[in-house]
Each structure stands twice: as C-alpha cells, then as structure tokens.
Image (tube, rainbow, N blue to C red):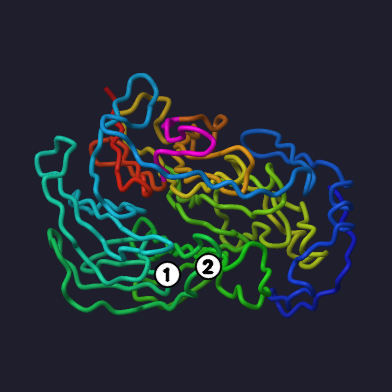
C-alpha cells in the first residue's frame, strides 16, 4: 500500500476526531505527492482491482441534460425479456416498496422541489398494469424507505423515522404519525435518503444514513451517526451502529438463503475519473469500511492527511466494485424463479449515473451473479439505453424491486416513470 505522510496531527476522542486543519483542501504539492505514490491493487470477491493514484486525472463536473423519453421509446433489456411502462406521470418516483398483500408503494421525493408523498399503485388483475393510483400519504419530508410491520406503516424521512397506524388494504393514511427516531437531516448531494429494512422475524429495523459531506470537509464532529447503518427495535429504541465508514449506503437487502445484510454504497468524489469505485458489499456487524479516512481497505485518502490511522488499520475491503461515480443506489436480490436460472439469487443494482466523471458512467441497471450466498462472477449490464449522448440522457434508474410475479420494477426518477422488466 502506498504511504501518505502525516502533515496534520488530529486528536482522537473515541472514534470521533476533531476536524483537520484546512477542511481537506490539498495544496498542489500534496496532490503531486499523492499522484507520485502510484496505483494500488486490491483483491475483491469478484476480481483484482487496480486503483489509480489519487488525482491521476482531473476532477470534472459533467452533468448531462435529462430530457425524458419520446413516445414508444424505452430502455433495453437482454434477449428473452420484455420492457413495458408500469407507471408514469409520477414526480421523481425515487423508491418502491411491495406490501405483504402486493400493494406497491412509491416514494416521490427529490433533492429540490420534492413532492414529499407516497403514492399507492395496485394491480388488481395482475396484468402488469396498475388499475389504481392513489396518494397514500403526503406532507412528508423527503421520504425514501418504507416498511410494514404488524399494524404500522414506517417511513424514512430525511429527518427521522416515522410510523403510522395501518391495516392491510388501506388506500390512504390520514392518521397522525409518530416520530420514533430522530435522524440528522439533509446531506451532501443526495445523501438525504434514509432507507429501511427489517430482519426476517421483524424484531429489528436497519436504517441507512449517508454522510453529510464528501470527505468530512465540514469536520468529522458533524458526522455523528452518519455514514452508518443503524439497528433499532421496531419502536425506535435500542439504537446501535450496525456498521460504519459507509459513505452513502442506500439500497439494502438480504442475500437469499443467508442472514447476511448487503448494501449499495456511493463512494467519494473529486479524486479523479476512476476513484473511488462505488460498490455493493456484505455488511459485517461492527465492521468499518473506511470513510472518510481510506477507501477499498487501507488506501488512505490524501485529503485526510493521515488522520484515523487506527480505523484505517481495521477497514474492510468491499466485496464487489461497480464502477466509479456510477451513483449505485438500488439493490435487490432476485429471489423468484421466473427469470432464467443465471439470475436466480443474484443482485440487481440501480445506477443513477455520474456527475463527477469526464465520460458518463452508470445510467443503467447492473446484475451481479451469486452462488451459495456469494458473488460468483463480475457485474454485467442488464437494463441499458438510458444514455443518448455524452450531453443528454433519457432517464436515470434508481431503485430496483422484485415483484411477487417475478418481474422487476425499475424506478426512473428523472422521467417520472417506473419500468417493468419481465421474462418472455
């Protein structure tokens, strides 16, 4: 591993450090020193990954225009699949949750001008087109994760976890919700999202909370309870940090046939085109995954100037890299049998798309094959066609959700569309 000279000494207070000097701004000399350190090789579950030195390429801002789809135009799936429009005319349909009775709940939320509501879709005759579309819950605050446990409907707003009285089949919630867990609100770029997942027996809820910054440039003391997956009881009590050092964990799911939690994580910006790869990874209870001090194990971020050495020594190498700056957000394991056997128990990953890379990356759904609860091959493209050119995209996939009938829903938030992918 390359060695980074410690230029600023930071004081430890447990696992919380004071902010380091100049808020991560690196001088020209420091950037040249990092570049001179050369590339690193990291062994992951699917490949040996060669990481370039920091600043090997310039950090660029490259945001394509989001134009939407023309009539009859749609994403492309592999041979043997059909793509249809499941729902449209939604306002930033960011996330989807399937209730126990098959009801489809869609969180409509965004960084700016957020609809702040949850819409209910119901496909009564199971023909792949919902007959019912109703506003289920509104006046929320950037909702994302949803969950039904017993007689409660849970919502992960950016500022906290709320639960509402609920009974199966309800088409609208009008009762007042109760905030059962405060969460730090907002965040760098899109780190306002708060996802939810329950364990098999419903005794624990897992809450993803992204960092409030790129690399703690506002001071690590402002990142308390952030860049974590939290574990709580269904009433909001008993909070524990399940895993930390995860810069922006969003999608979460259980690998089929196991009790292993997996998450999709957005890594840091402004180190160049190929740093740092986003990833999906199994999550070890009590594990530390590097942010903000290092990435992909013990590769130190030069902007942290040597801080956090004791944590870096314990940093876990993520399992599967899925491309730098791809904004990989959605994660769902395929736990049905309608797709061909190669997809069984594998992971679908929704990639919202890059802004910090000279050539567009992401803007697609990837698939990672699994066998016996572990990745068994490299990621491959599954749903593409979202990019028109380097300056224009038709849409941006976010969440991926496996339906009870074995089809796959893909939330395309920028076009207000949910796509359905089914095996022929």
State yes or no: discs 2 and 1 in contact (Cβ < 8 Å): yes
**Residue beneath disc 2:** 187
Q: Residues within 10 Å of mark 2 (few under 14, many from 20)?
A: some
Q: Residue at x 71, y 47 (%)?
A: 272
Residue lying farthest top?
79
Whether residue 371 is visible, yes or no, is no
Q: Residue at x 23, y 40 (%)?
A: 86
Q: Report x, y in % for residue 65.
A: 46, 44
Q: Report x, y in % for residue 170.
A: 13, 62
Side of 326 relative to 36 (left or right): left
- Name the quadrant of the C terminus: top left
Pick the residue in front: 82 or 316. Answer: 82
**Residue beneath disc 1:** 158
Res 171 quadrant in image: bottom left
Residue 67 magenta-highlighted: no
Side of 51 relative to 98 (left or right): right
Magenta stretch bounds = 382-397
Pick the residue in front: 285 or 227. Answer: 227
């Amino acid at each position: 591993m390359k060695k980074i000279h410690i230029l600023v000494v930071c004081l430890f207070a447990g696992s919380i450090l004071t902010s380091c000097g100049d808020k991560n701004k690196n001088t020209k000399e420091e950037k040249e020193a990092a570049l001179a350190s050369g590339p690193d090789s990291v062994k992951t579950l699917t490949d040996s990954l060669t990481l370039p030195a920091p600043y090997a390429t310039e950090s660029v801002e490259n945001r394509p225009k989001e134009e939407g789809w023309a009539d009859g135009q749609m994403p492309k799936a592999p041979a043997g699949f059909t793509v249809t429009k499941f729902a449209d005319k939604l306002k930033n349909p960011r996330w989807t949750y399937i209730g126990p009775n098959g009801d489809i709940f869609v969180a409509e939320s965004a960084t700016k001008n957020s609809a702040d509501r949850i819409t209910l879709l119901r496909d009564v005759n199971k023909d792949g087109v919902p007959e019912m579309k109703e506003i289920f819950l509104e006046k929320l605050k950037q909702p994302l994760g949803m969950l039904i446990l017993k007689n409660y409907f849970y919502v992960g707003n950016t500022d906290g976890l709320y639960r509402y009285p609920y009974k199966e089949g309800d088409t609208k919630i009008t009762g007042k919700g109760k905030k059962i867990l405060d969460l730090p609100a907002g965040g760098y770029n899109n780190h306002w999202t708060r996802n939810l997942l329950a364990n098999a027996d419903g005794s624990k809820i897992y809450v993803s909370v992204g960092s409030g910054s790129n690399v703690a440039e506002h001071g690590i003391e402002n990142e308390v309870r952030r860049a974590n997956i939290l574990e709580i009881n269904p009433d909001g009590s008993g909070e524990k940090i399940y895993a930390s050092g995860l810069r922006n964990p969003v999608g979460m799911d259980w690998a089929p046939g196991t009790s292993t939690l997996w998450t999709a994580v957005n890594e840091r910006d402004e180190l160049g085109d190929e740093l740092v790869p986003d990833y999906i990874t199994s999550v070890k209870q009590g594990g530390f995954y590097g942010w903000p001090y290092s990435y992909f194990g013990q590769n130190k971020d030069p902007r942290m100037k040597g801080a956090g050495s004791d944590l870096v020594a314990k940093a876990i190498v993520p399992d599967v890299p899925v491309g730098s700056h791809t904004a990989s957000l959605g994660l769902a394991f395929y736990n049905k049998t309608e797709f061909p056997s190669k997809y069984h128990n594998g992971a679908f990953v929704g990639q919202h798309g890059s802004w910090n890379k000279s050539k567009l990356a992401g803007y697609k759904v990837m698939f990672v094959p699994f066998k016996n609860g572990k990745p068994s091959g490299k990621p491959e493209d599954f749903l593409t066609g979202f990019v028109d050119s380097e300056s224009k995209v038709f849409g941006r996939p976010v969440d991926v959700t496996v339906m009870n009938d074995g089809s796959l829903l893909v939330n395309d938030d920028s076009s207000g569309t949910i796509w359905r992918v089914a095996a022929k």
